[in-house]
Amino acid sequence: MFGWYPEPLFVAGSIAAVLIYGAGIARLRRRGDKWPIGRTLAWLAGVASVLLSTSSGLAAYGTALFSVHMIQHMILSMLSPILLLLGAPITLALRSLKPAGRDQDGNAKRGPREILLAVLHSRFAAVMSSPAVTLPLFIASLYVLYFTPLFDLAMGNMWGHRWMMIHFLAVGLLFFWPIMGIDPAPRKHGYVMKMLELFAGMPFHAFFGVAVMMSSSLIVDSFAKPPAAWGTDVLADQQMGGGIAWAFGEVPTVIVLLVIFSQWMRSEERLARRKDRAADRDGDAELDAYNAYLARLGGSASAAGKAADEAADSATDSAADNAIDEDAAKADAAAPTADAAAAAEPAK
């Protein structure tokens, strides 16, 4: 089980993945930039998990025992993609690759960085990373493969088996890429949506494991005849494989949930810091505006009071004038009567 059985395709791919990743880090360091050691360790662990699944004793026994094959499947479709995505390879590529610049005519050139950006912004990438595609693909990797003759067909030759291993890894990467959100993706999902996408596949995954455990007959023929010397009960081994499929999904799911919660908390902290900086920057301006508003209110009230006082004074003066006029009128009216009385006095 712990022997070394190198599979040339996956060994070459793993070596290339480590060398290219290391070259990106070296370019950043030459430029004076740093790359988190945690991401590097996650990438190396992801590559190691791929090698473990395809070039160790798991690969040798995985062609004879269903339970061992299911361990391969779970590692390649759930654990390896999560570790590789934690390494943020797309982010590293975008940071380390130089822009191609422009030619003599001023037209933009298309270098590796521009091609990568074009792929990320393409409609094909947007469709392939949408939940309407990734979730059915993830589920089909279980049901369509194991409950149809497709599995026995793939196990019938070396390249079919290689295709199946590559398929497990590719589907896992495609499913977890937009959910984890570490690397740029065509679609940016909210944190609640990410958790919903993650939980949406769990019932199907669990039901598949239970269905395999409860099956009273072999679901695939490729594991019907293990070496007689092993004394393997093939039905019990298949049931064990179903239990592995059921239980193995819990640990990767917890890892992804922790990643999502960590991103959510950091996002809230960044938002709070931005608000604090905005308050510090705009606080004096807001205070000045508020004071000006109060001054305008005070000026309006003062003007209104002055107008009221003037109106009251005007009304008082007008009333006094009216009273004087009335008294003068009364005096004028009384004057003829007094004159007549004075004239009649001697006649008596």
Image: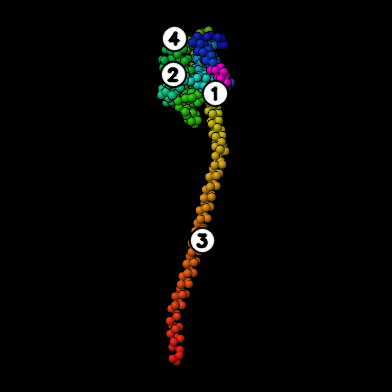
The residue at 45%/17% (across/down) is: 167
Q: Earlier in the sequence, mark 2 or mark 4?
A: 2
Q: Position of residue 263 (x, y in %)?
A: 54, 29
Q: Earlier in the sequence, mark 4 or mark 3?
A: 4
The span from disc 2 to disc 1 (Cα, nearest Å) is: 51 Å
Residue 205 sits above or below residue 293 on the image: above
Q: Which mark is residue 103?
A: 2
Q: Earlier in the sequence, mark 1 or mark 3?
A: 1
In the figure, residue 259 lies in which quadrant?
top right
Q: Position of residue 46 (x, y in %)?
A: 54, 18
Residue linked to disc 3: 309
Disc 3, SS: helix
The residue at 56%/34% (across/down) is: 273
Residue 27: within the magenta? Answer: yes
Q: Earlier in the sequence, mark 3 or mark 2?
A: 2
Q: Residues within 10 Å of mark 4 (few under 14, many from 20)?
A: few
- Contact (CB < 8 A) between labels 3 and 2? no
Stretch in magenta: 24-32
Magenta highlight: main SS: helix
The span from disc 1 to disc 4 (Cα, nearest Å) is: 32 Å
Q: Position of residue 268 (x, y in %)?
A: 54, 33
Q: Quadrant of the N terminus?
A: top right
Residue 246 visible in the snapshot = no
